[in-house]
Image (cartoon, helix red, strand yellow):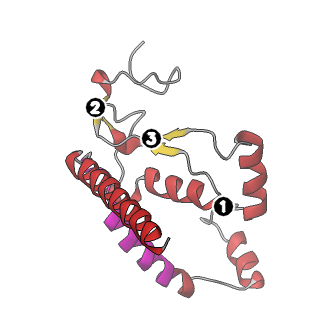
Amino acid sequence: MARSMMTRLTVLLIVLAASGAAAAQSAAAAPPIVNPAIDPAAFLRVAAAALAERERHRVSEAEFVRMAREPGTIVLDARSREKYDELLAALLPDKDVRILIYCNNNFRGAEGPFPKKLASASLNLSTFVALYDYGYRNVWELGPLIDVAATAIPFARGLAPGP
């Protein structure tokens, strides 16, 4: 009985090792999708620097109200996670729904509808992270930098060049 159990365990380990090696080989064989307009490492460096700066830029309620009244000040409402959850739940109630994302940094050749941004500020990165944080796991990001004139991606009317 012990020998039979050891044989099964050995076979199981061999199967697991072979499937793991095959998966690693398959992943290694696929060429990476390169897009110089999206830089995740720079995004993480900027995020770390921004968080350090954020600590020095937090103000009391009274200071916030005073600053908000000064000319040349814009107040942005970032809302709570609960309110964002409500919005996402209304728009994307199924956390298993497939979500495809892209941003300006996936396209070139149309500065009007797709103005160039810093590679570290590509909204692909923060959008993917935010959706992941909210529990969406079936999120897919367009990888390459594509010429708008050559893309097969359909755009909403008025969001891309042309008639």
In magenta stretch: residue 40: yes
Q: Earlier in the sequence, mark 2 or mark 1?
A: 1
Residue 15: in sight, yes or no? yes
Disc assigned to residue 109: 2
In magenta stretch: residue 44: yes
Q: Please report the residue visible at 36 percent of the width from the left and 51 percent of the height from the top.
A: 117
Q: Label 3 sits on what residue type?
A: Tyr
Determine whether the residue tagged by mark 3 lies in a helix, strand or loop: loop
The image quadrant of residue 10 is: bottom left
Q: Label 2 sits on what residue type?
A: Gly
Percent x, y of residue 60: 72, 86
- Compared to residue 139, the image places residue 118 above or below, namely below
In the rendered view of the protein, which quadrant contains the C terminus?
top left
Q: Please report the residue visible at 71 percent of the width from the left and 83 percent of the height from the top.
A: 63
Residue wearing tag 3: 102
Determine whether the residue tagged by mark 1 lies in a helix, strand or loop: loop
Percent x, y of residue 26: 27, 47
Residue lying furthest top in this view? 163
- Between the C-alphas of marks 2 and 3, the distance is 16 Å
Percent x, y of residue 157: 52, 20
Q: Is residue 121 left or right of residue 26?
A: right
Q: Magenta stretch mostly in which secondary structure? A: helix
Q: Label 1 sits on what residue type?
A: Leu
Q: Nearer the viewer, residue 4 or 34?
A: 4
Residue wearing tag 1: 76
Which stretch is magenta? 34-53
- Between the C-alphas of marks 2 and 1, the distance is 31 Å
Residues packed near mark 2 inside 10 Å, few (<14), some (14 to 19) or many (20 plus): some
Disc assigned to residue 131: none
Residue 118: in sight, yes or no? no
Q: Please report the residue visible at 32 percent of the width from the left and 66 percent of the height from the top.
A: 41
Percent x, y of residue 114: 39, 37
